[in-house]
Amino acid sequence: MKKKFFTYKVIRTLTIGDVHFHIGISKTDKHRYATFFHRDGDKEYAWIRFFDYLFDAEKDIVDRAYREIGLLELNMQRRNE
């Protein structure tokens, strides 16, 4: 079964640690693309953003994933202190 978020079918997923960033596409919504994420164990998605172009949605999840990497590194440093 394909993953869906409202009318958006997931077409791309980028996983960093326990966070899964998704791009969805819709044939019926005003904005064709949406980005959202969830953490392992969460049942709900968060931070939905809407885009008219796939490239803009791709930039958004890459930017979010890059920030998540920084948080993971900071947590690892704190554990090692």
Image: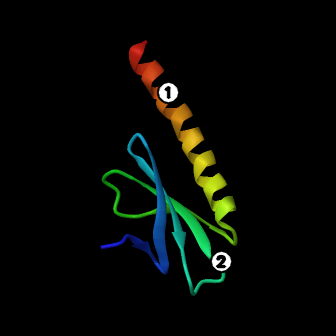
Position of 40 relative to 34 (above/below): above
The amino acid type, in three-letter code, at marker 1 is: Glu
Q: Which quarter of the figure is the C terminus placed in?
A: top left
- Residue at 56%, 84% (x, y): give it: 27
Dividing the picture into quadrants, the one containing residue 47 is bottom right
In this rendered view, identify the residue nearer to me: 76 or 29: 29
Query: Considering only vertical position in the picture, is 59 above or below 75?
Result: below
Contact, mark 2 vs mark 1 (Cβ under 8 Å): no
Q: Secondary structure at mark 1?
A: helix
Side of 8 relative to 2 (left or right): right
Residue found at the far bottom of this picture? 28
Question: Looking at numbered disc 2 in the image, what kind of residue is underneath it?
Answer: His
Check the image and report above or below for 41 versus 28.
Answer: above
User: Who comes first in sequence, dot 2 or dot 1?
Assistant: 2
Residue drawn at (52%, 35%) of the image:
69
Q: Residue at x 44, y 63 (%)?
A: 45
Q: Which residue is mark 1?
A: 73
Q: Position of residue 55 (x, y in %)?
A: 67, 60
Residue 60 screen position, x and y as percent: 64, 54
Report how many numbered discs are placed on residues in the image: 2
Please tell me whether mark 2 sits on a helix, a strand or a loop. Answer: loop
Choose top left, top right, bottom left or bottom right for residue 31.
bottom right
Mark 2 or 1: the one toward you: 2
Residue corresponding to mark 2? 31
